Amino acid sequence: MRVVLVVNSGSSSFKYQLIDVESSTTLASGLVERIGSGDAAARHSNSSGDGDGRWDSDVSAPDHFAAFDVMVAAFAEHGPSLAEFAPAAVGHRVVQGGARFFEPTIVTPLVKINIDELSALAPLHNPANLAGIEAAQRAFPDVPHVAVFDTAFHQTMPPAAYTYAIDKKLAAKHRIRRYGFHGTSHRFVSHATAEFLGKPLEDLRLIILHLGNGASACAVSGGRSVDTSMGLTPLEGLVMGTRSGDLDPAVLVYLQRRAGLSVDAVDAFLNSQSGVLGLSGHADMRDVEQASAAGDPDATLALEVYAHRLRGYIGAYAAQLGRVDAIVFTAGVGENSSLVREWALAGLERFGVELDPSLNAVRASVARRVSSDASKVEVLVVPTNEELEIARETAAAVGG
């Protein structure tokens, strides 16, 4: 096993990377977007040295099958050659695995049926993931395809962590429980943190904060997820770019009764019009920080709410773990915003958490320590690489 093609398929786009698992090197990456429209576009970047670099073009992609043909043509015309760097397997990101899938799984007809049935829990994601699998199987019929589930890492949570306090028969009938997401990222960062610290993962208790446009916290004990902030859907938990995070459920009923909003309108409101966007008018944390620095009180409040929620989860997970060896920031906001890290940890010095301002201010693309020498808890910034993790898990699933 050397080369794995990793596919992340959405409803109208898909991203891909060709990865050399042995060297952890990305040979090529790309994107086909606006699938099904009249103005689809493709981007392909060849970093292997075998080909002509970057290519962008408008393309015809009426469906995912045509989009995969565009990708294969891009490899043929711009490299690297799929004859020379033939993928030994294709790894697929699948968002919702329910309680059925707790590890990377080779795709079979039965697995596809299960992914389809689980679409009720992830209607915006699983159908698109399945469409990508179908198209990739046609494009690469002679290699194994592996589904890597966002939810799988969190299947080690104890019942007390994943159970909602509602009628158990109703919950069982409709599969209502906390599943958690960003599992691939949390797994990758857990291992990368242990490697950075030079300690066995089995001995570490970590709080990992995946902060991007979507955001989640995870308590990891001995390499196993024991609690996470996202729930039945990715809406629960931290404040995010456009998602509200934790909310009194009575707010939904109130909005329906008082504001006359429909179920679909409430769903769109909480997922697409809330979070820091709803508070500040900006969904991108860089814009929020810039507006706050310019004196915008709404942007400052958005940052304060964002940090307040983070501190709450850090404290809760410290209590669940009993001991915290490291707090780890990752993903776009976590890796790049020194201000978010500073505000999220403000006031935690009494619990042994102390940032080093000069280290925290450094921008870098490598794992690094940002806590002071006096801090009893390590504070780290560890870049995530979900595609590499999918490639590794795919290779392991097929015995590579």
Image (cartoon, grey):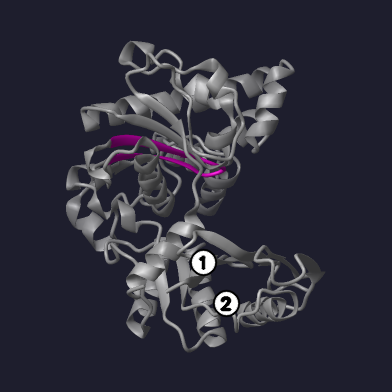
Amino acid at circle 1: Asp
Q: Is residue 323 magenta?
A: no
Q: Which residue is mark 1?
A: 20
Amino acid at circle 2: Phe
Magenta stretch?
205-220
- Please give the label number shown on residue 335: none
Q: Is residue 239 above or below residue 22?
A: above
Q: Is residue 215 magenta?
A: yes
Does residue 222 show up?
yes
Q: Quadrant of the N terminus?
A: bottom left
Name which residue lies at 75% across and 79% down: 77
C-alpha span from label 1 to label 2: 9 Å
How crowded pointer 1 is (Cα within 10 Å; few <14, some 14-19, many 20+) is rated as many
Residue 15 picture quarter: bottom right
Residue 287 picture quarter: top right
Q: Is residue 146 above or below residue 207?
A: below
The kind of secondary structure element at disc 2 is loop
- Please give the label number shown on residue 85: 2
Labels 1 and 2 touching (C-beta < 8 A): yes
The kind of secondary structure element at disc 1 is strand
**In the image, residue 326 lies at what x, y percent?**
35, 30
Name which residue lies at 59% across and 23% down: 361
**In the image, residue 226 lies at what x, y percent?**
25, 43
**Magenta region, main secondary structure:** strand
Q: Is residue 89 above or below residue 139?
A: above
Answer with left or right where residue 179 lies relative to residue 11: left
Q: Quadrant of the C terminus?
A: bottom left
**Nearest the camera: 336 or 395?**
395
**In the image, residue 22 lies at what x, y percent?**
45, 64
